[in-house]
Image: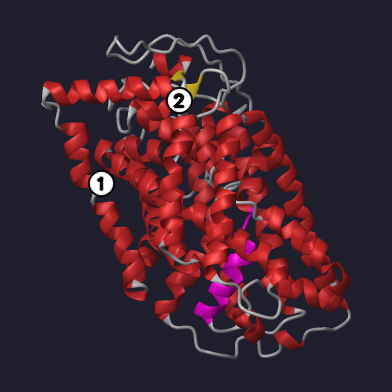
């Protein structure tokens, strides 16, 4: 089930275009099929790279994070400052990833860079927490926001039952899982439609807000830094909320091998995208405060609905529909790019081989999608939105900080490595220090959720030695794993991709 690590890493490309001549194994063979031909289409231009980053970043965060940031900063002025600082930090992090992406031209993102810099153990732990913590919790967070917003118009005068939110959320997650398992082409079309809806939903907030400012509606900005004093312990949680809203700038690095002229296009796509998103997010938050006060925002469970209600009363139902589409679960978190990490890790022998296989007819990463569903449901029914956000953010920013620290380490470990794009050293130093400092401080700010995340992260160390290092497993155990792989291949109708076999 866990195969021996490949010597080289070959990109899987962008999924699943072309023909498949895959051969499923026989139940009597005892071995997975090793013939198959899944041709994966490539080519990511500058414009498409920009659309990937913007489309991935802009998501539920702009509706979830304002309350979390304001709660942990204490004032309108500090909250807007945090939004701006998080945008700048995200730009710094993205530029660091641009250097990594142009000198390590392999897909896999965080996992690949940690593998190159620090070796297999930290890389395995990274993909371990991606599978057990980050991906399921991130999907649950955005989906919970979807569930609340879709029910909000029906409970305008009373509190929405938490069970109702979680049930409608579970339906949405399952629908997305089915969609991602059955059709890549339809998933791509829906993502384009969702990107359009995102821009419309943001403009519906920003344009009336700018009009309000022109009319002189600035009462909520008077004494902007007055209010509850921001505590040092609240800053990590504000940081988590802000960086969650900007998360997604690193996803272009998951498909580095597919980018045309990566030395030029990756840095350009990152810089253009981050400037657009940062300006858009700050303007959106300014627009919120043109109609609602800080106190009202903290009391609101659905800030966009309240904002729409104040600005465009007669169009609230239509506006809320746009937000619901915007937040459709999994669009940001169950797309093709995060799953690519599972493909690469499987090729390296750090995940079961079955996770890198493709459906023979539908050309979808069926096993990788299916394995995330029950984990996401566990997260969904055992946590609330903000506790899950802190839970996943601990592991996410711990390893992103480690990746950028790895950039500094590689400067000294491999000084002769070609670096077509190189950032000043203070940028990775500042970014990695900020991430690791906030992660450490969060253990005091929210010891329960971040502590659980830390404990699960540590389980990756014994798991590595048990599943990867220990190669003297009993023969019956190895045969059992092979049998399980063959059975799953037959049941799911999946085969290795052509690139997978070459590795």
Circle 2 residues within 10 Å: few <14, some 14–19, many ≥20? some
Q: Which mark is residue 499?
A: none
Q: Per the image, is 404 magenta?
A: no
Residue at (66%, 90%) from the top-left corner?
223
Q: CA distance from mark 1 to mark 2?
A: 28 Å
Find residue 164 and report its image quarter: bottom right
Residue 175 visible, this orientation: yes
Q: Nearer the viewer, residue 94 or 137?
A: 137
What is the span of residues highlighted in magenta in the rendered image? 58-73
Magenta stretch, overall SS:
helix
Quarter of the N terminus within the rendering: top left
Using the image, determine if residue 338 lies above or below residue 229: above
Q: Which residue is nearer to you in this view: 274 or 150?
A: 150
Q: Earlier in the sequence, mark 1 or mark 2?
A: 1
Up-down: is 435 above or below 249?
Answer: below
**Image disc number at residue 492:** 2
> Residue 382's spot in the image, x, y percent?
40, 62
Residue drawn at x 80%, y 60% is 203
Q: Which residue is mark 1?
A: 460
Say if residue 417 shows up in the picture.
no
Residue at 57% from the left image edge and 64% from the top image edge:
165
């Amino acid at each position: 089930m866990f195969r021996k690590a490949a010597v080289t890493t070959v990109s899987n490309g962008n999924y699943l275009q072309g023909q498949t001549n895959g051969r499923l194994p026989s139940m009597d063979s005892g071995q997975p099929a090793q013939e198959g031909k899944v041709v994966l289409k490539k080519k990511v231009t500058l414009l498409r790279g920009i659309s990937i980053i913007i489309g991935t970043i802009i998501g539920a965060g702009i509706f979830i994070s304002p309350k979390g940031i304001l709660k942990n900063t204490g004032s309108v002025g500090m909250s807007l400052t945090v939004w701006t600082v998080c945008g700048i930090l995200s730009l710094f992090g993205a530029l660091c990833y641009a250097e990594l992406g142009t000198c390590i031209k392999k897909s896999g993102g965080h996992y690949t860079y940690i593998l190159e810099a620090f070796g297999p153990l930290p890389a395995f732990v990274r993909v371990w927490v991606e599978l057990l913590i980050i991906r399921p919790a991130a999907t649950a967070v955005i989906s919970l926001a979807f569930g609340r917003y879709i029910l909000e118009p029906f409970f305008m005068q009373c509190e929405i039952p938490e069970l109702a939110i979680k049930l409608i959320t579970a339906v949405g997650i399952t629908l997305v899982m089915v969609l991602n398992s059955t059709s890549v082409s339809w998933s791509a079309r829906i993502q384009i439609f969702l990107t359009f809806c995102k821009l419309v939903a943001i403009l519906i907030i920003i344009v009336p807000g700018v009009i309000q400012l022109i009319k002189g509606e600035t009462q909520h900005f008077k004494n902007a830094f007055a209010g509850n004093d921001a505590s040092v312990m609240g800053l990590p949680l504000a940081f988590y909320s802000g960086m969650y809203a900007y998360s997604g700038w690193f996803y272009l690095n998951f498909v580095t091998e597919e980018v045309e002229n990566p030395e030029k296009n990756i840095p350009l796509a990152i810089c253009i995208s981050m400037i657009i998103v940062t300006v858009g997010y700050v303007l959106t938050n300014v627009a919120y405060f043109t109609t609602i006060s800080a106190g009202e925002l903290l009391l609101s469970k659905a800030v966009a609905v309240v904002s729409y209600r104040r600005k465009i009363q007669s169009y609230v139902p239509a506006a809320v529909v746009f937000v619901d589409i915007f937040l459709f679960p999994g669009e940001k978190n169950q797309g093709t790019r995060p799953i690519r990490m599972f493909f690469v890790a499987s090729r390296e022998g750090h995940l079961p081989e079955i996770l890198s296989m493709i459906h023979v007819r539908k050309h979808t990463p069926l096993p990788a999608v299916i394995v995330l569903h029950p984990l996401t449901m566990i997260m969904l029914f055992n946590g609330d939105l903000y506790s899950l956000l802190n839970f996943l953010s601990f592991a996410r920013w711990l390893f992103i900080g480690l990746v950028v620290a790895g950039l500094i380490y590689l400067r000294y470990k491999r000084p002769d490595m070609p670096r077509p794009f190189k950032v000043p050293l203070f940028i990775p130093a500042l970014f990695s220090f900020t991430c690791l400092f906030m992660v450490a401080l969060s253990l005091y700010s929210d010891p329960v959720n971040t502590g659980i995340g830390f404990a699960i992260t540590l389980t990756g160390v014994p798991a590595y030695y048990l599943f990867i290092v220990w190669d003297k497993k009993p023969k019956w155990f190895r045969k059992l794993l092979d049998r399980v792989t063959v059975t799953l291949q037959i049941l799911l109708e999946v085969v290795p991709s052509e690139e997978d076999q070459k590795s």
